Structures are given as C-alpha cells and as structure tokens.
Amino acid sequence: MLADIKIVEICGIGPGPFCAMHLADLGAQVIAVERGEASSATGQSAAKNAMNRGKRSVIADLKTPEGRAAVLKLIESADALIEGMRPGVMERLGLGPEVLLARNPKLVYGRMTGWGQDGPLAKAAGHDNNYISLSGALYYCGTEGQAPSSPITMIGDIGGGALYLAVGLLAGILNARTTGKGTVVDAAIVDGSAHMMQLLMSMASRGAILEQRGKSMHDGSHFYATYRCADGHYISLGAMEPQFYALLLEKLDLSEDARFVRQWDTDRWSEQRAAFESIFGSRTRAQWCELFEGTDVCFAPVLSPRESSEHPHMTARDVYFRRDGMLQAHPAPRFDGQVLTPRATPTRGEHTEHVLAALDADSEGLWS
C-alpha cells in the first residue's frame, strides 16, 4: 500500500520504532539507523528485534562525522524521518529539522516524544504511565478506592504516540507531494492520549460519565467490568444496552431477581457488583465461555497473548503468527479482506554494508 514511501528511522525505544514498523508492515521502505554500540536501554542487541521487521538495519554512530554524513545523505531521497530523542538532542547532533529540511525541502520530519517539543516538562524524563497520567487518560483505569492500573503501553506509547505519529507523517507526505513543502510533525503522547479521550469527554458532557471515580459505567457498574473466576482466570462483560443486559440476566437465571432489575441505579451498583463477583467466582473461565461466548451478552475471556493466539476466533482470522522464535501479530488493518504478511526481520546492522555502499556510489538501488 505504501511501497513508494521512503522513511529513515533514527532508532530509539517504544513508539518511534513501532510507528516505523507499522508503516513498514503497510509496505513503506524503512531504513532503521541504529547506534554504533548495542544498548540494553534501547533493547538493541545482535538478536533480531521484532520492532525491526520489514525494515533494513544500518549501524551508524551519530556522534561521529561519518555517522551524521550517512544520515544527511539518506534523507536526501527520503519522504520522512522518525526520531524519538529528547528535545534538542538532534539539533546538538547537527541533524535538527532546519539542517535536514535545507537538504530536502520536501522532508516530513517526525518527532516522537512524551511531553512534546515545548512546554515546562518538555525536557524531563518520563514514560507511558506518566504521560497518560498527566493527560487524564489514566484517571478511569480502575475502580473506586483502588489505584488506577496502567495499561501496558497501549494507551500512551502506541495509541497516543506511535499511531498519531503515523497519521501525522502520512498527512505531511501527502501535503509535501502536493505543495513541495515538508513539515515538522510534533507527536507528543500527552497530546495524542488527550485527543483519544474526546469520545469520553463527549459522554461526560451529557452526564454519562462523572468525574468522581467509581460512579460511571466504565469504572463502577456491575455490567461493564471484569470478574475473577473459580480457576483464577478472568472474564469481561460489557452488557450496557438494555437488550444485552436482559440477555445476561436471562443466562444467569436472574431475570426475576429484584436486585438486578434496575440496571442504572448507581446507588445499588456496589451491591450488584459484589453479587456478580460471587456468581462469576463460582465457575471456571471455560465454563463461562461455554455459556456466553458467541452470544449478545457482550462477553470475552481475559486471555494472555499466547492464549489469544490459540483462540478459535483469532486463529480463524489469522491474527497471530510465529517467526524467529517470537509470537507476533500480523499487520492491521486489512485491505480487501487480505491478511498482510510482513517482510523479514533483519539482524542488527544486517544492511549496513549494502546501504553505505549505495550511498557512496550514489546508487539508485539505495531503497530497493
């Protein structure tokens, strides 16, 4: 889908590499520039890194004139660059937006950070849970009286970071191809994770969600929650609509139980939730799957990635696969119903010799 898009990635951690992998999954040509020395802080090693699938891996030390010269040469024929350094680092390396856009005026310069390129916190360290805490996205991730639980990278690094950067890069590339002018994309996780809450804030404006934790459907109700089963596994419910809630009660033989007749009586949610905890704790996850799965109760078991890869629905859709000894997910979304097969994952530095030789020769085969 994106075969004519060329991207240079300055490798880092988290959302930047994921963004580049996602674009590579969709066909973009990505050259990943990895630092001169392997670093446990960035997850770099001689082994294959799943975040590098579909890319070509080149080792270059950006602290050396040779490494910087290689990047400057690479971006001359690129559509976009991705970097995830703290604000000011690329400028100090002599690879900031002004320098690169002078070399390639059509370049889209993608900057991935947690706090953004400006603001009081811009240069402070942080991680996914910090960014979504500040944006408000973590606030409802828990129940009343309990500390919010950080969802692992999903909301911040990936949702609010990598995917927003991907959209920004593609928008910038489309604009550059029309106008001939590149741009700088400032993708901050605090911005993206806040923007993702627009649906929630729309619901809040109608009174469907209250600021007090534990008093809204998502964090206080009995019908939209997760429950522990007899075997220690968990299941999830989302029976918010009246017809789905009625079906849930019917399958639990609770249709005539006065405790559950008033679904939206928030004063009784605590009592109803406690009753559901007892009920769902009486059977195993497999037993609840047998009763609910495939019905309109709005139900799913809480699975580990390995368990998910073995579930009949996920196998039917061919969501997961194994390669290089790693469980991986196929690219998403799908086009015309087809599952995209990602290109191979390189070893670290596998393409250094070929790419640098092509640069020296000014070869047209650099991106092939």
Image (spheres, helix red, strand yellow):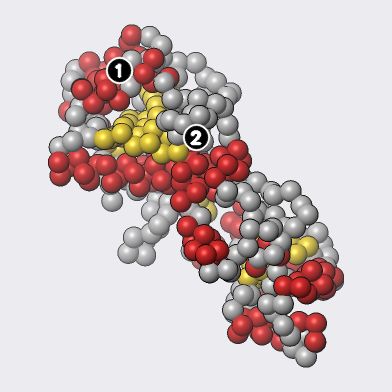
- Return the residue at label 2: 115
| Residue 119 position in % (x across, y down) | 46, 31
Vertically, is 226 above or below 63? below
Q: Residues within 10 Å of mark 1 (few under 14, many from 20)?
A: some
**Secondary element at image label 1:** helix
Taking the spot 75% from the left edge, 64% from the top edge, the residue there is 227
Q: Nearer the viewer, residue 358 or 333?
A: 333
Q: Amino acid at mark 2?
A: Trp
Of the numbered discs 1 and 2, the one sitting upstream in the chain is 1
**Secondary element at image label 2:** loop
Q: How many angstroms separate mark 1 from mark 2 (CA)?
A: 29 Å
| Residue 135 position in % (x across, y down) | 54, 45
Taking the spot 15% from the left edge, 44% from the top edge, the residue there is 178
Taking the spot 73% from the left edge, 58% from the top edge, the residue there is 143
Vertically, is 242 above or below 89? below
Horizontal placement of 341 versus 145: left or right?
Answer: left
In this rendering, does residue 76 appear at all? no
| Residue 155 position in % (x across, y down) | 54, 48
Taking the spot 30% from the left edge, 17% from the top edge, the residue there is 70
Where on the picture, by quarter, is residue 96?
top left
- Return the residue at label 1: 70
Given contact means CB atoms under 8 Å apart, are the residues at marks 1 and 2 in contact? Answer: no
